Image: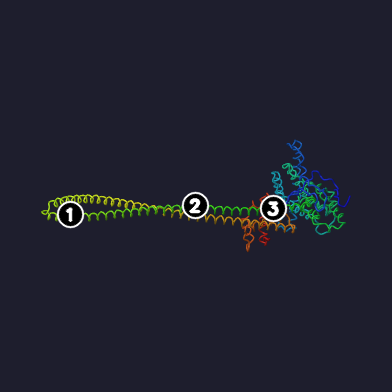
Amino acid sequence: MTITEWPQTAAAPDPVSPAPTVVSETPAAVSATPGIVSETPDFVSETQKRNPDETAPAVPRGPLTGMQKLAVGGIVAFALILAGIGLYLSFAHVASFAHKELRFGSLEKGQLFAVGVDVGIMVMIAVDLLMAWLKRPITWVRYPVWLLTSATVVLNAASATPKDKQWALLDYVAAFAHGVVPVLFIMIVEVGRDAIDRIVRPDREGRDAIPLIRWVLAPVATPRIYRRMRLWGVASYPEMVRREQDLLAYEQWLKRKYKGDLSKATDDERLPMKMAPYGYTVSEALAMPDQQEAAADARKEEAEQRRLEATTRQELAEKLAEAERLEADGKLESVRARVEGEKGMARAHSKAQISAAEKAVERDEAALETAVQAEARTRRAEAERQEAEAREATADADLRTAELERQAAQKRKEAAEADRVAAAEAQAVETQAIAEARKATAEADRAAAEIEVAAAETRRAAAETARKEAEEIERTARAEAGVEVARKAAAEAEKAAAETRRAAAEIERRAVEIEDEAKLHPRERSVRKVARMALTAGIFHDGLALEDVQYELNELVSIADVQRECDVSSTDTASKYRQEAAILIADGYRLTV
C-alpha cells in the first residue's frame, strides 16, 4: 500500500446502517462526495439508510391469543402486587423518618407526607402510561417520577441507617434493601411503558443499544460514541462503529501522508476530524468545501440575475417612456396641422369676402358713372329744348317774315318736340336702369352683409373650437406629463428596490462568510438570518427593551417567512428562531457589509 492510497476500513460497511437523524434543525446529510477532495482518494464511505427496519417488511400483528392475554394479565397483576408491596414497605418507614428526623410535627403529618409522595408517583406513572397508550407520549414525565422515586429510595435507606455506631457491612446491606423495591417497581414501569409504545406504534424508529461489554472495555470512548448517537440521531450502532473506523483510518492515512505531522495538512483535509463531533461522516466533511463553494456561486449567480433583471426592467421603462413621448409629439404635430388647415380656410374665406366687397364697390362706381352721364344728357337736352323754344319764339316773331321760315321753324319745333320726347323717354329709361342698378347694389350689399355675418359666426365657431381643442391638448399634455412623471417615479422605485435587493444580497453573502469563519452551528446561522431579515425590513431597535424588539420583529417577520427562508417545517421552531433573533438584536447585532 502506497502512502497515497486510501486505507480500507476495519469492518465492512453495514449495508443497512442508518444516516444521522436531523436533530435541532441540523442541516441535512451531504448526499454527494466529489471524486478528489484535497488529494484524497476516490473511495469514501457512503451514509446508509436512516433506519434498518425501513427496508424490512412489517411483521403482521394480529389480536393477542388467549395465552398471551393471560400472560399480560398476570404481568399486570404482579406489577400491581409489587406496587402495593412497595407502598406498604415504604409507607411506615418514610412516615416515621419524616416525623422523627425531618421535623414534621406529628406522625399523622409524616404519614400524609409519605402518602403524598407515593400518590404523586403513582399518578404521574398512570399519566405517562395513558399518554403512551394514546400515542401521545410525554417524555419529560418520567424524569419527575425518577426524581421522586430516588427521593423515596433515599428516605427508605436513611430510615435504616444506624444512629450511634459506626457503619458495618450489614448496615449497608440494610440501606440497600430498603431501596430495592422502589427501584424494581420503576424498572417494571419503564418496561411496561416501552412495551405499550411498541404496541401502539409498531412502525416507530428503532435504536440500537451499545453493547454492555463496550462500556466495560472502553469506559472513556463509549460515552463519546453514545453522546454522538443521541445528539445527532444515529440509530444504528454498527453505523456509528463504521464512522469511527473511517475517521481513524482517514487520520492514519493523513499521518502517513505527512509523516506524522498533521499540522502540515490543509484545513480541508482536517475537516473530518473537526466535524466528527457534530455528526458528520468523513465523506460528508470532505464534500463540505465544494458544496459551500457551489452554494456561494449559486447565491452570486442569483444576485447577478436579479441585478440584470432590474437593469432590463429599467431599460424597458425608459424605452416605454421614450415611445410615449414620441407618440405625444406625433399627436401635437397632428393638432398643429389641423389648426394650420383651419387658419388657411379662414384666410381663403376672408379673401373671398374682400373680393366680393371690391366687386360690389366696382358695381357702385359703374352705376354712379351711368347716373352722371344720364344727368349730363338731360341737362344738354334741356338746353336744346330751351334753345328750340327760343328759336320758336324767333320763328313766331319772324312768322310774318316768311312762311317758309315758319314752316321750317314748325318742322324744327316738331323735330325739337320729337327730340324732347325722345329725351324724356331716354331719361325714363335711364332712371329705371339707375333704380335697377341701385336695387342690384342694395341686394349685393345685403348679400355681402349676410356673408360677412356668416363669416364672423364661422370665425367665432372656429375660434371656440380651437380654444376647446387647445384646452383639451393642454389637459392631455398635463395628463401625459403626469403619467410620464409616475412612470419615471415607478422606474426610480424599481431601481431603488433593485439596489436594496443587491445590498441585501451583499450583506447576506458577507454574513455567511463571517459565519463560515466563526464556524457557527446551523441553528445559530438560522437565528442570525432571521435577525438580518428583521434589520433589512427596517426594525426600530435603538433604545428599546427586549419585549419591544420582540414585538417589532413579530410585526415585520412572519412565521411563514421564517419557515421559508430557514427551510424548516415546524412553526414552533420558527417561533423560537424569532425569539432568539429578538434577543440577538437587543444585544447589539447589526448588519455589516
Instruction: Give the class, few, some or many, for how many residues have Cα within 10 Å of label 3's Cα (few <14, many ≥20).
Output: few
* The one of 315 and 13 positioned closer to us in this rendering: 315
Spot the residue most to the top: 66
Q: Are marks 1 and 3 in contact (CB under 8 Å)?
A: no
Q: What residue sits right under mark 1 in the picture?
A: 388
Give the position of the C terminus as an image quadrant. Answer: bottom right
Q: Is residue 456 among the parts visible in the rendering?
A: no
Marks 2, 1: nearer the viewer: 1
Left or right: where does residue 363 sit relative to residue 513? left
Element type at mark 3: helix
Residue 352, position as x, y percentages in the image = 38, 52
**Numbered badge on residue 334:** 2
Circle nearer the viewer, 3 or 2: 2
Amino acid tagged 3:
Glu
Which kind of residue does numbered mark 2 sit on?
Ser
Q: What is the crowding at mark 1: few (fewer than 14 residues within 10 Å), some, or many (at least 20)?
A: many
| Alpha-carbon span between mark 1 and mark 3 | 130 Å
Q: Nearer the viewer, mark 1 or mark 3?
A: 1
Specify the farthest residue to the left.
Answer: 400
What residue is disc 3 on? 301
In the displayed orientation, state which residue is furthest to the bottom. 543
Name the mark on residue 372.
none
Viewer-nearest residue: 141 or 334 = 334
In three-dimensional space, the C-alpha distance between marks 2 and 1, rounded to whole angstroms, equals: 81 Å
